[in-house]
Structures are given as C-alpha cells and as structure tokens.
Amino acid sequence: MPAPQQPSPNRAHNQTWDAATLSKADKASVLHPYTNLRQHQTDGALTIVSGKGVWVTDSNGNRYLEAMAGLWCTTLGFGESRLAEAAKRQIEELSFYHLFGAKAHPPAIKLAEKLLSVAPSPMGRVFFTCSGSEAIDTAIKVVWYYNNALGRAKKKKIIARDRAYHGVTVAASSLTNLPINQRSFDVPIPGMLKTTCPHYYRNAKPGETEEQFATRLANDLDALIQAEGPDTVAAFFAEPVQGAGGVVVPPKTYFEKVQAVCRKHDVLVLADEVICGFGRTGNFWGSQTFGIKPDLLTMAKGLTSGYLPLGALMVSEAVFQALADESAKIGAFGTGFTYGGHPVPCAVALETLAIYEERDIVAMARANAPRFQAAFRALESHPLVGEARGVGMVGAIEIVADKASKTPFDPPGKGGGTVMRCCQDEGLIARQIGETIAMSPPLVITPSEMDEMFSRLGRALDKAAKLLGVKG
Ligand SMILES: Cc1ncc(COP(=O)(O)O)c(C=O)c1O
C-alpha cells in the first residue's frame, strides 16, 4: 500500500467529510452497480475524491495510477480544464434544450455534423442518447423499425457474440452475453441470437491458424443465419475489440469474413465503438483498425472523455431513408430521451473532439502503443500469465494456474481477484474481468507513466504469485 498522505477534510461544495463518515454513509445509502452487495456491507468501497491526469486520490489520501481511465472513458485524463470551461460556457448560454418535435440547438447540430464527417463509413444521421446502453437499445429499435418500414415483418433477430458487452438496459443486456449480466435478471428477451466469441487463445482448435479460426467462425455465423432463416435475421452487433468480455482482439481476417456473410444475407452490421472509438485501438475508430464498414455505429465514453454522459448512434443513409418513410407513415419517429443530445454534454463533446485534433491524440495513442503492447507481451513470461493480448492502448493479461493446460484457478475469479487486489495495494487501478486483468489508460499517459504502470503491475503479479502459492 502506498504510504497514506495526510487525510484532508474536503470542503468543496460547502461540505466537510472524512473518510470514515463517507464510508459509513456509502454503505448505508448507495446501491452499487457490479458489486457483491453483501460483501460491500462489510468491506466498503474505494472512495475516489479527486483526479488529475492519470492519477486519482482516495478518501484516505492514497494516490493511484488509473490504468482503466475510469471505465475505459477518460481518454484525456482527469481534470482537463478546457472541458470544464466548455461546460460552464454552455450552461450559461443555453442550459437545457432538446431535439424532440423538430427542435434543435447549435451544440447538437455541430456535433452531429462533426461526427458524420469522421465516420468510418458513409453515415446519414446521428441520434443522441445519454449512454452506450441507450445507443444500443435505440439501435435495436431502429433495426426493427427499419425492417417494418421495408415490409419485412419477420426480419427481426439480432446476433451478438459470446462474451459481448453491449450494455445493461433490458434489450442491450440481452445482447451482453456475460453470465453476470443475464443471470437472475430474466434476460435475454426472445429473438436475440449468440455466436462464437473470436478469442483465439481460448476458442481456437489445436493447430488452427488465426485465419482458419476466422473462417470457421464465419462459417458458424453463416450456419446460424441459415438455420434461423435469413428472412428472420436482421443484424449482427459487434465490438471491434470485445472490451468488458476480456479484451478480445479478433483474429486476422475475422471482420472481413463475417461481414461478407452478413452482406450475403442482407444482415445489417453494427459496430459498437463505445470503448474502441476515439483512438483506443490506434485509429480514430476500431472499425478502421479492423476494416469494418458498419451500417450502424454506437459510441459513448470517449465522446466526452467521460466527463459528461453522452452516447450516440449513427445510421447509414439507407437506414435513415427507411426510418424517414416509416415516420411519415406513422406520424413521428417515436423515440428519444429527455437528455439525449443535451447541449452541455454536446458542447463538451465538441471541445473534446477539438482537443483530439489539436493534440493529435490518435497519433499519440499510435506512437505509445508499441511500448504499451511490448510491456504487456513481456508479462507472458510471468508464471501467472497465460496470455497477454491487446491492440493500440488497450490490453489485458489472463491469469492461469497452469500455463501449459491454460487451466484457471479454482474457484473462478480467484486468480484475477488476487491480482486485482495486489494491483490496488500497489497503487494501481486495473479492471478485473473474471481471470483477466485489463488496462486501458487515459490516452494522454506519458511513456514514463506507462513504465510506472507496468512496474506496479509486475510487483502486483509477483505478490499475487506468492499469495496463490505459485513459484516464479
Ligand atoms: C462496447 C460497449 N457497449 C455498450 C456499453 C454500455 O455503455 P454505458 O455503460 O454507457 O451504458 C459499454 C460499456 O462499457 C461498452 O463497453
């Protein structure tokens, strides 16, 4: 544990608090997402009180290198004053307006125009939401509406991959194929189909090359669509890199092959860029890194550098035209969120995009990526690490009890959980996903901060190996 600094009472917002009072209030009042709620009642939370650059500070004064950019989102690091100023200016200019019933405001118009100009394939319109889940949820509705517009009442099923993460609303979590998101929540809803996760390390057959693996998965997808009936399958949703499913980088030729299958069956392709968008994979979009030409594209997180909630769905011109026809028939495109396209997050997004351009954040990510990826790959020699994987500025290690057989620790999560706790003790915040430890730091991280990050991770792994009884 880093040496605690002087706990200082925080008087921001005219409130005084201390760590113990906060912890007690947290346990008594907050229902925490993605948390073992019973355990939280005893252990409490790690309460973060401030952040600057890649560093955050907890309520006891301990500093952590935030290797996850929060939740894969604070691309510009914490405390960027230009974004605070953009929010302040917009609140003073126009604190709220909406886009319902053909109303508009400049920040949403300018942002939509800007996003269309940088889209990875030609896009027609942008629909704003408050989150990635809402963008996915809206995409599902759009896909259904589109097929109704075309008179294809049966063409409604949507395919996602195993271990996909597309969010948590009822429909989005029906495409989030992770047990923790579906168990006991009575999802998936009907009509959601699942195909194989393109994780070469776990799912390739012995001796299979990456290309052969990709061909097999494309054939599986084809067989699934044929078995269901192509006239019943509407869309294929995919993250360029599966993030919350464990940082799964697709095998070579995968997207080329699965897109060909989708085109053959007139199945729309949605690229879920909520994590991969805005430079994460070394290009502006993950779609550019992997040659995806989506009909629909969802984004959030890095759109505002995570500073304010904002998501968006882009649709192709062909999809837009069908929506327009159907809305004219019915009377309106009857969906929208009160805060979707709120002027303040839109203004912050415009400023974020301006900073990306001025500082060439994508080039910075691309320049830092070889050092970042090499440091990950070097960890493969560690006795606990079965696989190190990643692309651009996102990476992960998979913890195993036995490298030769790829056997995880028992019970599930024991290896990953131990490493994650050791990271925290070393002043490093990484993300545990089962047996995987993921890192996706702010894109503004410097080479020396990266070195610091990996030396902390290395120490954490050594400590975890001792605790797990594994010899180096
Ligand atoms: C690929 C992907 N899609 C959708 C979502 C859901 O976004 P949100 O948490 O903003 O609802 C996430 C969140 O991590 C994500 O990673």
Image (cartoon, rainbow, N blue to C red):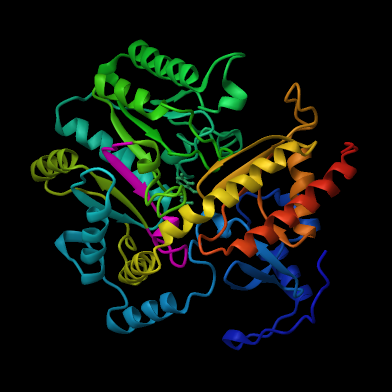
Question: In the rendered structure, does residue 300 fall within the stretch colored magenta?
Answer: yes
Residue range in magenta is: 292-310
Question: In the rendered structure, does residue 134 fall within the stretch colored magenta?
Answer: no
Position of 177 with respect to 98 (left or right) is right
Q: Please state the horizontal and vertical placement of residue 422, each as a whole percent of the image.
A: 79, 52
Picture quadrant of residue 305: bottom left
**How many discs mark residues in the rendered view?**
0
In this rendering, is residue 224 above or below 442?
A: above
Position of 181 with respect to 10 (left or right) is left
The rendered magenta stretch, by its main secondary structure, is classed as loop
Residue at figure coordinates x 66%, y 65% from the top left: 29
For the C terminus, the quadrant is top right
**Closer to the camera in the image, 389 or 263:** 389
For the N terminus, the quadrant is bottom right
Q: Please state the horizontal and vertical placement of residue 279, each as a whole percent of the image.
A: 42, 53
In this rendering, is residue 378 above or below 221?
A: below
The answer to whether residue 190 is visible is: no
Q: Please state the horizontal and vertical placement of residue 25, each as a whole percent of the image.
A: 71, 70
**Closer to the camera in the image, 343 or 102:** 343
Position of 321 with respect to 394 (left or right) is left
Picture quadrant of residue 179: top right
Residue at figure coordinates x 62%, y 57% from the top left: 67
Q: Please state the horizontal and vertical placement of residue 163, each as a whole percent of the image.
A: 54, 33
The answer to whether residue 355 is visible is: yes
Residue at figure coordinates x 22%, y 49% from the top left: 334
**Closer to the camera in the image, 51 or 463:** 463
